[in-house]
Amino acid sequence: MGGDVLPYVYQVTKYDPADRDQHGHYTGDEPATSDHGPIEAAYLQAVAAFAADAGVDHLAIREPQVGGFVHFGLEPPVDGHGLDGLFPEGLAGFYDGALVSIEVGLELVRAMLRDNGAWCRLEVDGVFTVHVGWDQYLYVGSSRPCESALARARSLGLFPERRDASPYDFAPDDPLQVQRPADADFWARVRWAVSAQRATFLEENHVYNGTRWHRLTRDTIEAVRSRLAPRARLAVWPDLLTDVDAAMAALADEDLVEVIWEDHDGRITSTVVDETRFEAVSCRIAGARAAGVLSLVVDERQPLFTAVLPDSDGVLRARWQTEATPSDRDWAFLKTLKRGQVVTGRVTAIAGFGVTFVDIGGFTAMINIPELSWRPFDHPSDIVSVGQEITAQVLDVDMIWERVPLSLRALQEDPWPQLAQRIGEVVTGPVTKIVPFGVFVRIEDRADGFEGLVNASELEESPDDAIAVGDSLTVRILDVDLVRRWIVLSHKHVAEAGTEERRRL
């Protein structure tokens, strides 16, 4: 998910290397805050020179963030995050992947140098990067040496130094996590969850530390979807906002939480609350139509499932990740499966209605009764037992319902074609069942042997009067239906077999 390190990376600062001690610590008296004047202008001119040397005229915003956790310098954030006037659509234009001109990019660098409460990486994939770091340390990466820009930076009184990499290069929280995209399968699952009343809210984050909430109904899903910011991180939640009194009681028991409330006009607001804001927020949610409280502890903050919006071509280029939920982990596992694949698992349970559950790599798949065996049986426990390791074939991978049906019999030889070759054969076998319309007779000498039906019209006597379960009956195989898996027998016309060889089981 992270980009390749560019071959030329420079640390550009206002700090003279001569003012560093033997450990590399700066010992000069230059303040870390921006001077909003000549030094700041020098930084911006240096960035412009590097961009010109690299041959770029636009930059892409990556991983934008706002709020109080940026703190690269010593200045407090200001209203508007230093982004006022940069985007016609306001903060909505500050999103991952947004392309901006060099001029707008320089204003973003200015905001970061001043620590105005906004930060992002500025990049051209594989060509150019600009990262603003702690205490106005600037890192520029390029696919070219940029000798002219280095000379320009030095002439401006700055100190560029070659580095192996920028410490602010993107690195995923979990390199092994497969991020779920908000694709067609995701939205189909959202519709299913809303219809099942398991989900009513969508959390949208298009910048770090910036959240929008949307109420979902079957009628509003598409409208909400159309308003989402590009590459936003999404989380689908159950109905949070139901009981205002309960929400206020929960708020009183927590030290630091996120509070969400919906007013009577349908506007949804969220804010982080500690003990200093408890009273003010309690007053606001007291008049709300609904409210809820979410923990800020990751392990306790559990939406139903999450995703990140792909680009319009369906490719997921956003590099940030969501906190994976159990459903997300199931999704990632299901993406490794395909129809027809053979898997090994362990039987975990046999339900009262006969479905067998199997653990395949931490995901619970299922085997319906007909898929246990080609041959007849009375109960699934005749075929498998809890704790048994089995090998089965994947019949389907349902990404919406997150279900995987398996089959044992798909890996077994189908005996029915061989049975079809026995049409016309006369055999003797035990009567296994008597029904109003005839009797069933087993035609193979084994406990799980196949049974066929002798219709009442094909019996010489009434089945109720003359035949009992367990009696031996000589029958002729009239038909083997390979589609319906049905065997038709006759007792009445056995004598017509003439000299045909008979075989007693």
Image (cartoon, rainbow, N blue to C red):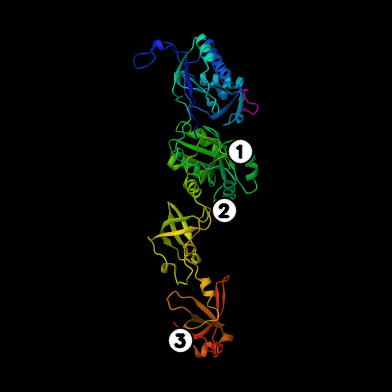
Question: In x, y percent, where is residue 500?
Answer: 52, 86
For marks 2 and 3, the one nearer the N-term is 2
Asked if residue 111 is positioned above or below residue 341 in the image, the reply reads above
Determine if residue 94 is in view. yes
Determine if residue 287 is in view. no
The image quadrant where one finds the C terminus is bottom left
What's the magenta region? 84-90
Does 127 appear in magenta? no
Judging by the rendered image, the residue that carries numbered circle 3 is 471
Name the dominant secondary structure of the magenta segment.
Answer: loop
Asked if residue 239 is positioned above or below residue 405 in the image, the reply reads above
Give the number of the disc on residue 196.
Answer: 2
Asked if residue 95 is positioned above or below residue 53 in the image, the reply reads below
Question: In x, y percent, where is residue 152?
Answer: 53, 11
Q: Amino acid at mark 1?
A: Arg
- Could you classify mark 3 by the number of other residues whose Cα lies within 10 Å: few (under 14), some (14-19), or many (20 or more)? few
For marks 3 and 1, the one nearer the N-term is 1
* Mark 1 and mark 2 residues within 8 Å of each other at the beta carbon: no
Which label lies toward us, 3 or 1?
3
Q: Secondary structure at mark 3?
A: loop
Judging by the rendered image, the residue that carries numbered circle 1 is 267
Question: In x, y percent, where is residue 256?
Answer: 44, 35
Q: Nearer the viewer, residue 70 or 390?
A: 390
Q: Secondary structure at mark 1?
A: loop
